[in-house]
Image (tube, coloured by chain):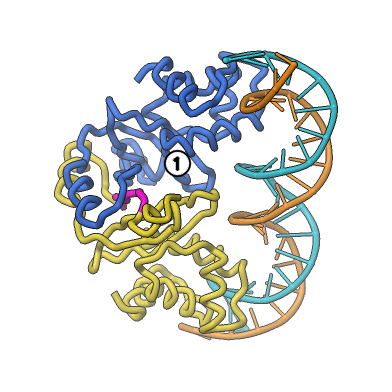
Chain colours: A blue, B yellow, C orange, D cyan
Amino acid sequence: MKIEDVLELIRKEGYKVTNQRKAIIQVLIENRDFLLSAEELLEKSKLIYPKTNMSTIYRNIEILSNANILFSDIDKNNIAIYKLICSNNHHHHLICKSCGRTEAIDYCPIKAIEEITKEKNYILLDHKFEIYGYCEDCQNKGT
Amino acid sequence: MKIEDVLELIRKEGYKVTNQRKAIIQVLIENRDFLLSAEELLEKSKLIYPKTNMSTIYRNIEILSNANILFSDIDKNNIAIYKLICSNNHHHHLICKSCGRTEAIDYCPIKAIEEITKEKNYILLDHKFEIYGYCEDCQNKGT
DNA sequence: TTTGGTGCAAAGCGTTTGCACCCGC
DNA sequence: GCGGGTGCAAACGCTTTGCACCAAA
């Protein structure tokens, strides 16, 4: 999924395309394998469009969440972290509980998900399949 | 998993068993199919042991998290929500994005999880497999 | 021109923390 | 009695919000 696809989606929902919004989405696309906090999103967005403000970050997080294209989670320090949900290049993560490293995995139990939602008569929106553990480095460090 | 099993685990980790702690764990066990916020945990714990305080709730949330027996997530209002991880009676959830209803499902991609962590050389701690959608009621309400 | 978007600063509120006291063990 | 656990209240800091101004369409 390229930035133009997301912008098109944004336009369809009736939102305007601003420089700040473009910067934020570009950052999310470039970091689709990483869960970013609001602060990290701001820092990286500022590299693209320096005038970006934290309020704008939060307001766009909400818009993208409502559009169901943003995955949110909570890290070990209770800070909300986000990444884009991309229907193609879809994958999940191995997340190290010690250093926070995130590693993409291709496996996704999508077949099961579709069967379950059909059986329970839910309209499928989103799903999370994340695995937490200790990565090799952290095991060696003995943490 | 009964309350005694969790208390035994708590004792093994070197923690004391207090009335507040027992109340909190009992609430978590009784609500193992629901994701509870800190405030809901407090309210329900107070029904068992009225003197329970919010600080105690948060401190016990941290202890149970560190012991890797607490699952945490974040709801649509950015509030942290929790439930016990029980190795037996293990299951995941269908979560309605509209009304917040949680429905247990038996399916778990545990085989895949074990294979992936082995292949990537991670020590497996925990995993999330949650499906989000709109339940039948909310579909009928047209929300 | 219209209307949603943004920056700024202040407010809100869930969460954390210091300290004195309490209570399992 | 010792050392961890708790209650209280204040502090913290992430997130939200009101308002005036800006900019996309």
Chain letter, disc 1 residue: A
Left or right of B120: which side holds B63?
Answer: right
Residue at 67% over, 17% down: A51
Left or right relative to A4: residue D9: right
- Label 1 belongs to which residue? A72
Picture coordinates of residue A86, whole percent (x, y): 34, 29
Q: Position of residue A100 (x, y in %)?
A: 42, 38
B53, above or below B37, in the image: below
- Residue B5 x %, y %: 32, 76
Membership of A69 in magenta stretch: no
User: Looking at the picture, which amino acid does disc 1 mark?
Assistant: Ser
Q: Visible in this render: residue B127?
A: no
Quadrant containing the N terminus of chain A in the rendered view: top left
Read off the magenta span: B126-134
Q: Give the answer, above or below, for where A35 lies relative to B133.
A: above
Q: In front: A139, or A85? A: A85
| B68 sits to left or right of A91 | right
| Identity of the residue drawn at 21% across and 51% down | A118
Taking the image as drawn, is residue B14 in sight? yes
B129 in magenta: yes
In the image, B61 versus A135, the foreground residue is B61
The crowding category of the residue bearing disc 1, from other C-alpha atoms within 10 Å (few below 14, some 14 to 19, many at least 20), is many
Q: Is mark 1 on a helix, strand or loop?
A: strand
